[in-house]
Image: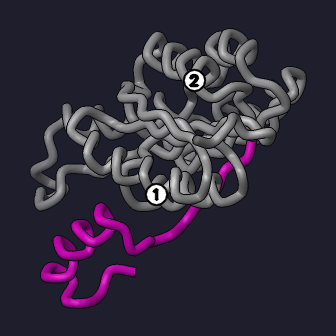
Amino acid sequence: MSTKSVKGAAIVTGAAQGIGKAIALRLAKDGYDVALNDVPGKEDSLRTLADEIASHGRKSTIIIADVTNEKSVVKMIKETVSELGILRVMVANAGIALTIGTEFIDTRLEDFEKVLKVNLIGASSINGKRGKHISQYIQNALFMDSQLRFVRQATRPRAKLTPCHTAAEMIKHGITVNAYAPGYIDTPMGKLSSNHLQPITNAPYS
């Protein structure tokens, strides 16, 4: 049975598949214990991932939580600290795409709002007042995000949700903020998008 990591704990949202799963495994290989977050229905995938992490001698805990809900995010962080110890890394990886198989012209407003809620509001879960509250559970942490890059495109240029503004505000809490912006990645969600677009464009999605 593994002991708590001397490196501390990490949270990865959207960890059940794709980029989130790969990040969680890499963090485990690098010596971190990992809290695995995703939505209801992903439990089996998360349990399989937890077994893989255990094979690397690291601990994990599965937390089903809604990243768009402030109370849910705070609860997730508290559970992580309780189960795994000091939180050192938080990866806001969770993200969704517009309904696969639906033409953009037929997209419902509620579908678009759901994407914005998860990809933008969820990604900003440590910003502002939430950041002040959550920071008490984090020590010298690294916050990594794959969705903040969309904030600058979806909001006015000086919005205080951009990676630069967030980094400048969170450094006083001992938190470093970084954003990563992958292009097309061969993941389950990426494949579904590719399969939908290829018949339209008659070319690979890249």
Q: Secondary structure at mark 2?
A: helix
Which is more toward the observer, 45 or 111?
A: 45
Instruction: Give the residue type at disc 2.
Output: Glu
- Image position, residue 105 (x, y; %): 14, 54
- Image position, residue 159 (x, y; %): 65, 31
The residue furthest bottom is 203
Residue bounds of the magenta highlight: 177-206
Q: Which residue is mark 1?
A: 52
Q: Is residue 179 magenta?
A: yes
> Please, is residue 203 above or below residue 200 in the view?
below
> Please, is residue 161 above or below residue 43 in the view?
above
Instruction: Give the residue type at disc 1.
Output: Glu
Q: Quadrant of the C terminus?
A: bottom left
Mark 1 and mark 2 residues within 8 Å of each other at the beta carbon: no
Query: Does residue 132 appear in the picture of this structure?
Result: yes
> Please, is residue 30 above or below residue 144 in the view?
below
Marks 1 and 2, how far apart at CA: 18 Å
Color encoding of the figure: one colour
Q: Is residue 13 left or right of residue 34?
A: left
Q: Earlier in the sequence, mark 1 or mark 2?
A: 1
- Image position, residue 196 (x, y; %): 17, 71
> Which numbered dot is residue 83?
2
Binning the other alpha carbons within 10 Å of mark 2 as few (below 14), some (14 to 19) or many (20 upward) gives some
Q: Quadrant of the N terminus?
A: top right
Asked which quadrant contains residue 126, the reply is top right
